[in-house]
Image (cartoon, rainbow, N blue to C red):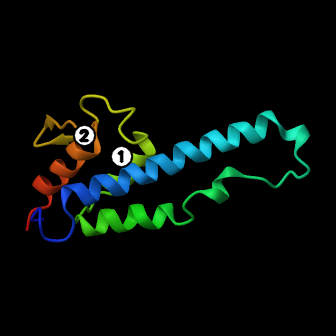
Amino acid sequence: MKENKILSKEQFVKALKELQQVDEFTAEVNEVVRKHRDDICTDFINGDGLGIAHKDLVIELLDKIMGSQNKDVDYWVYELEYGKKYFEGCVLQDDKPVDISSAVKLYDYMVSRYED
């Protein structure tokens, strides 16, 4: 995929950064709710409702837009927790480890892998 074809690196990184910020905010809200459950009048408060309702769709679209056949964005977000759990060798290209520890590096990898 050509770098300027659909998404720029900045657009790609921004989308993932915003998803991560929403996830982190949701986790903080859920923690506050858990700590103060007795003070809250309902059992139905859930921080996830405050976050992006279509996270899976956004991830799926990023994978498709970037030409991923292997759900690279999905793997990076869910399995590697936005690159926080990255370890050398978790992704190989031509039997060599690829650093996808950040959204920028993930983008570079995807552009190199899925060029037209």
> Residue 88: x percent and y percent?
25, 28
The 10 Å Cα crowd at callout 2, few under 14, some 14 to 19, many 20 or more, is: many
- The label on residue 111 is none
> Residue 13: x percent and y percent?
29, 52
Figure quadrant of the C terminus: bottom left
Q: Quadrant of residue 71?
A: bottom left
Q: Residue at x 52, y 51 (%)?
A: 22
Q: Is 16 left, or right, of 115 in this rendering?
A: right
Q: Residue at x 26, y 62 (%)?
A: 69
Q: Which residue occupies the foreground of this view, 15 or 116?
A: 15
Give the residue pinned by disc 1. Answer: 76
> Residue 44: x percent and y percent?
82, 55
- Mark count: 2
Q: Quadrant of residue 59?
A: bottom left
Q: Quadrant of residue 111?
A: bottom left
Q: Amino acid at mark 1?
A: Trp
Give the residue pinned by disc 2. Answer: 100
The 10 Å Cα crowd at callout 1, few under 14, some 14 to 19, many 20 or more, is: many
Q: Which residue occupies the foreground of this view, 91 or 36?
A: 36
C-beta proximity under 8 Å, tags 2 and 1: yes
Q: Is 81 left, or right, of 32 in this rendering?
A: left
Element at badge 2? loop
Residue 6 lies, with reference to residue 35, above or below; the image says below
Q: Amino acid at mark 2?
A: Ile
How far is the residue under mark 2 from the one under mark 1? 8 Å
Q: Which residue occupies the foreground of this view, 49 or 97?
A: 49
Figure quadrant of the N terminus: bottom left
Element at badge 1? helix
Q: Is 93 left, or right, of 104 in this rendering?
A: left
As drawn, the residue found furthest toward the top would be 88
